Image (cartoon, grey):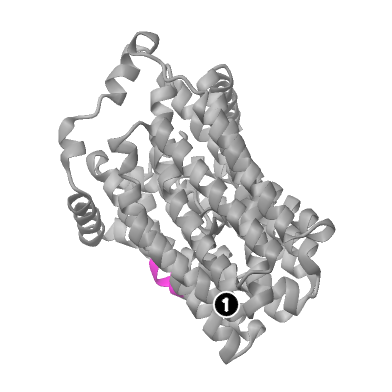
């Protein structure tokens, strides 16, 4: 209990530091409204695609988008190091606002679905520049290190709230308005986000503590490295360290289920349960509710010195509950499953970044996370493609059961390695939050962000 009280006290102080920093308040205000728009657009686009092409169209479009994002993101993310980060964020917001407005017009005019599919893909690609710039600007806006820790806490909380607020709003818009209205709502969130980011003033070195000036001073050699050099070192580190390889492999397995959920979620709501758009929104919202609970559970469990084993169990909880839907296809079982996945999502994300921070040399951590991000998107693409094939080959319910069984069983051989990591790395206990804001932001992403 003393550990929990210390963590809660530390989190409260960290959040207080962020609230008193005007620049951080504005960047997180932009992040909040943009994240809600993410959820609205993701659900509305999924409904549109499913109506016009069924599960095949959802799976194919998801696969194409993930592949293109994996190819484009490593290059667009370098814009944050080459140009003013505020301008990169505002530019990404404005481009997406224009694209989503075009999407709303196309839907209203009844244009070809292929035109809208293209706009959906382009909007997702345009968004790949925003998140790295946001992650990179946070340390520049902090006056002291404690504010960076607070940014971690606030980011995680906003993510979880956005996960259920966005889909819930989308469900209401689709129930009482239409997809055009949902897209317009999303475009407005981009305009609001761009306005808030534009008003941010970056502190001068005189306004920062000495430790912050030292922290944000980046050696020129890091910026001089090409993407290919950074990526190569990240992949090499993963391949030659069995502990890191275990964590990354299991994390990608979880992403396979996340990619599959982009297909089966809309199919379950509209085809299996027939609960309509509003019901689909509530299903997706349960992920965020579970995420809030999972974040608290991760905070409580962090002092047990079992981060790696809990991480593995979390990956299994991402997959195993799908058997519940397959066995009892009703709204209660679906909501329980989505809630469990949300809980597991927070535990997996928090534990994964903490483990990697402890077992990866600090000078290689960023590159390992970059390589992990590529694997994450690839895993989601594979999951979307596999779920589409299973729906057509064996049916939705059996497909869910197969995904749940295969991924859960695949985790089992790694449990002994996870126990070894706990014994060798966390024997003395771990009771502190993740140290890297950038690392945390890299990992804490899900299909809502990638679908945009």
Instruction: Find the magenta span and give its range.
Output: 410-414
Q: Quadrant of residue 130?
A: top left
Left or right, 427 with reference to 201? left
Left or right, 148 with reference to 227? right
Question: Residue 443: within the magenta?
Answer: no
Q: Looking at this view, is 43 or 439 the one in front?
A: 43
Measuring from the top left, give residue 82's x and y in whole percent: 28, 37
**Rendered view: 352 above or below 55:** above
SS category of the residue bearing label 1: helix
Measuring from the top left, give residue 61's x and y in whole percent: 52, 71
Q: Quadrant of the C terminus?
A: bottom right
At 51% across and 76% down in the image, what residue appears?
60
At 62% across and 85% down in the image, what residue appears?
398
* Residue holding disc 1: 57
Q: Quadrant of the N terminus?
A: top right
Q: Is residue 156 visible?
A: yes
At 69% across and 64% down in the image, what residue appears?
109
């Amino acid at each position: 209990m003393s550990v929990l009280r210390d963590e809660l006290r530390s989190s409260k102080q960290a959040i207080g530091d962020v609230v008193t920093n005007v620049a951080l308040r504005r960047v997180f205000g932009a992040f909040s409204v943009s994240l809600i728009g993410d959820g609205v657009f993701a659900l509305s686009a999924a409904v549109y695609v499913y109506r016009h092409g069924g599960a095949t169209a959802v799976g194919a479009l998801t696969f194409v988008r993930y592949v293109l994002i994996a190819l484009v993101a490593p290059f667009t993310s370098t814009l944050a190091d080459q140009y003013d980060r505020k301008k990169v964020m505002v530019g990404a917001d404005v481009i997406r606002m224009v694209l989503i407005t075009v999407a709303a017009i196309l839907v209203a005019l009844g244009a070809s679905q292929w035109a809208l599919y293209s706009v959906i893909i382009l909007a997702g690609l345009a968004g790949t520049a925003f998140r790295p710039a946001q992650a990179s600007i946070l340390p520049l806006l902090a006056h002291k290190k404690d504010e960076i820790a607070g940014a971690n806490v606030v980011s995680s909380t906003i993510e979880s709230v956005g996960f259920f607020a966005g889909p819930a709003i989308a469900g209401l818009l689709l129930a009482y308005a239409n997809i055009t209205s949902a897209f317009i709502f999303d475009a407005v969130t981009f305009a609001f986000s761009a306005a808030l980011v534009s008003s941010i003033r970056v502190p001068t070195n005189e306004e920062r503590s000495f430790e912050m000036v030292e922290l944000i001073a980046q050696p020129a050699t890091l910026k001089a490295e090409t993407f290919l050099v950074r990526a190569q070192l990240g992949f090499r580190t993963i391949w030659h360290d069995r502990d890191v390889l275990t964590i990354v492999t299991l994390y990608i397995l979880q992403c396979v289920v996340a990619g599959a959920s982009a297909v089966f979620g809309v199919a379950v709501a509209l085809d299996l349960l027939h609960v309509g758009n509003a019901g689909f929104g509530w299903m997706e919202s349960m992920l965020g509710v579970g995420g809030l609970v999972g974040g608290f559970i991760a905070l409580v469990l962090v002092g047990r010195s079992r981060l790696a084993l809990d991480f593995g169990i979390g990956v299994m909880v991402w997959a195993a509950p799908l058997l519940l839907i397959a066995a009892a296809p009703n709204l209660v079982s679906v909501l329980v499953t989505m809630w469990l996945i949300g809980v597991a999502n927070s535990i997996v994300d928090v534990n994964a970044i903490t483990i990697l921070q402890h077992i990866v040399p600090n000078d290689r951590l960023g590159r390992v996370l970059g390589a992990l991000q590529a694997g994450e998107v690839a895993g989601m693409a594979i999951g979307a493609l596999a779920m589409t094939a299973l729906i057509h080959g064996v049916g939705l319910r059996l497909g869910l059961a197969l995904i749940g069984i295969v991924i859960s069983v695949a985790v089992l051989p790694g449990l002994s390695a996870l126990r070894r990591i706990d014994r060798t790395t966390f024997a003395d206990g771990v009771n502190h939050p993740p140290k890297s804001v950038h690392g945390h932001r890299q990992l804490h992403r899900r299909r809502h962000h990638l679908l945009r």
